[in-house]
Image: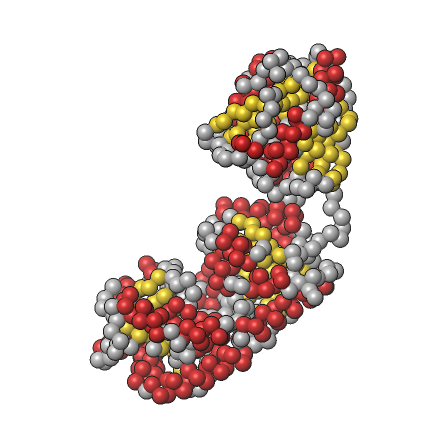
Amino acid sequence: MSDPLVSFVIPAIAVDSYLLDAVASALAQTWTRLEVVVVLDGATGGELDLPADPRLHVVRLPERCGTPIALNAGVAASHGELVARLDADDLAAPDRIERQVAVMLARPELVVLGSSVTVVDHHGERIRHLAAPVGGDLRRTLVTRNVLTHSATIYRRDAFDLAGGYDRRCIRMQDYDLWLRLALLGEVDNLPEALTSYRVHEGQHSRRTPPWGEASRTVLASRRRLARRLGSPAAAQRMRDAVWTTAQFARHTGLRRPRYLGRPAGGDRRGTLLVTTSDISLDVIYHGQIRHWATHGVEPLAIAAGDTGRLAEVGRREGVATHALPLARRPSPVDDLRGLVALVRLLVRLRPALVVYGTPKAALLTALTSALTRVPRRVHVLHGLRLETQTGAARRVGLAVERLVARVSTETVAVSRPLVETCRELGIPIDTTTVLGEGSVGGVDVARFALAARDDGLRAALRARHGIRDDEPVIGFVGRITADKGIPTLVAAVEALRDRGLPAHLVLVGPDEGIVELPAATRRLLDGEGFHLHGPAEHATEVMSGFDVFSLPSRREGLGTVVLEASASSVPVVVSDAPALTDVVEHGVTGLVTPRDDVDALADALEALLVDRERAEAMAAAALRSVGERFDQADVWRRATEHLLGHLEAAGVRSGAA
């Protein structure tokens, strides 16, 4: 079109089905004097899918520049006297431009005109009608709130240029800021008809940006400027600004739903959300079990965690939706506040009937936010108590947190009975605490570990990696490398064995979460001969068969799943007398138990099993039978699934279980 009156401007970050539908709706207008300008903001590929229409022009930005810059580039490339906006995921009614042009030509004092919209979902199905305010001139309402839907507007190009275009500081709310500046030049109004279909979906940019920072400050300044032009008292505008700021924060946190979503039905909660502090916990603790839940009636199911890079892959593997949260294990007031806000928003958006949470940080924040957002069933999975090895203020805070989480949760599922008894002794409420079966969260895939135990190649690979001869005994450890796990005691015990003339090697498998905090003597030994830091393993089956004895001299444990995995691998075990460990290891029958922090006793027990291999093998065989009877994965998963389905039924949700 050589002489268009109207230019549609559509910025996009990808050429997808949404954009193609938006462009098609713009080109299908009953008003013919128009052009369509598509701005590809860093988008690559798919351009050939755009229709071959002489009215369509494409502006390519080589890298992602952001919405304000993309919009300014689109307007700069346009030729019409009037600029019509359309988002890349929305649809324009066929007669939209014809209706809006008629009003703009009849009312030259108007600088921008919007309309009501029809809110639709990602499939294009109608959600609701969102009526726009109308009144001839809406400038006095504009200093209170945004009265225009950006994707439904048309404005004068000359006024746009005089106002200075979109402010690049406004990565969000750039439309509201522009209307406030355009209102200094003329009137603002809406048509009552719904002339645009406004699409709501998870990828929506406006739904994931925070209401603070430079954009908010810029908008507030523009509101005050227009209020002064209209003669509004400064005090009155300050009050309006305070209300607006509060409303924006409430919307971002989920305490207030956006107007375009309407009010939720009272009984529309459904599905389950599983939350942990880190995606590593989801990957390791719930490997395979999440898919099992989802395929046995616990649906829809979603997972959320702090994302270290594994979250998306875990979601693909388990076949569920994922949501990254700004969570970190270490305390941080700023990060914790961000996590709290993110959780509230997620819970309000998903409206689950059941939330399951475990690991300390996630447990606290999710318990509070799920109670705040009135999730009917809130299940806390208690893996252990970090406060058992804490002292002073840290212990007092930890105890207060555990008591709070227990009180706020609908139920606490502890991973072992000794853990429940410890809670009782510490004064943590246990009236809603239960243990499923013998305990455990995920159980042990006994068949998989037994198969790996017969793989001589795995044993040879571990020894070759660390330069250990076949005739030298290997003591193994799998877990976090921290003092809580008894690493100083274990290292000293192995050094004692070497001093006795036994050429034992210690292989520590797991992430470094505190080596620098270990005693200097321990760190020196770890740098010496016979001690090997293996790093994390993808799965415990990779290393278990390389051990002659497994040891976990932990100061505290919730259950000690890794001990069960060693037993499933037919590796004899030596553990500390931490209550949960004595529940899974019967001294002298399925392994040996020594006092916590007792180096000599641990060295003696390790030596006994390394020297008397017949006794060691008998204990390993008994332990294998015990694990199969008490903690087989299939039984643990079945119990957990039935338990979750019971919670969903209690919440009034019909499951998809056959």
Figure label count:
0
Q: Position of residue 109 (x, y in %)?
A: 70, 12
Task: Work out whether 284 lies above or below 189.
Answer: below
Image coords of residue 342 (percent x, y): 57, 47
Q: Residue furthest front?
A: 52
In the image: residue 34, left or right of residue 633: right
Give the image's coloring scheme: secondary structure
Residue 152 position by quadrant: top right
Is 117 situated above or below 160?
below
Along the viewing direction, whichever of 256 and 295 lies nearer the viewer: 295
* Rendering quarter of residue 195: top right
Residue 535 appears in the rendering? yes
Could you say which is closer to the camera, residue 25 or residue 251? 25
Q: Residue at x 51, y 30 (%)?
A: 41
Q: Residue at x 34, y 83 (%)?
A: 609
Where does the C terminus fall, quadrant-wise? Answer: bottom right
Residue 379 position within the rendered picture, expressed as x and y whole percent measured from the top left: 62, 62
Along the line of sight, the residue nearer the viewer: 608 or 567: 567
Can residue 487 be seen here? The reply is no
Residue that appears at 42% across and 68% down: 540
Return the residue nearer the eye: 141 or 29: 29
Residue 571 is situated, as x and y percent measured from the top left of the image, at 39, 78
Residue 573 found in image quarter: bottom left
Q: Quadrant of the N terminus?
A: top right
Where 536 falls versus 476 (above or below)? above
Q: Looking at the image, which residue is at 47% across and 49% down?
A: 332
Q: Is residue 482 left or right of residue 229?
A: left
- Against 296, is 595 above or below? below
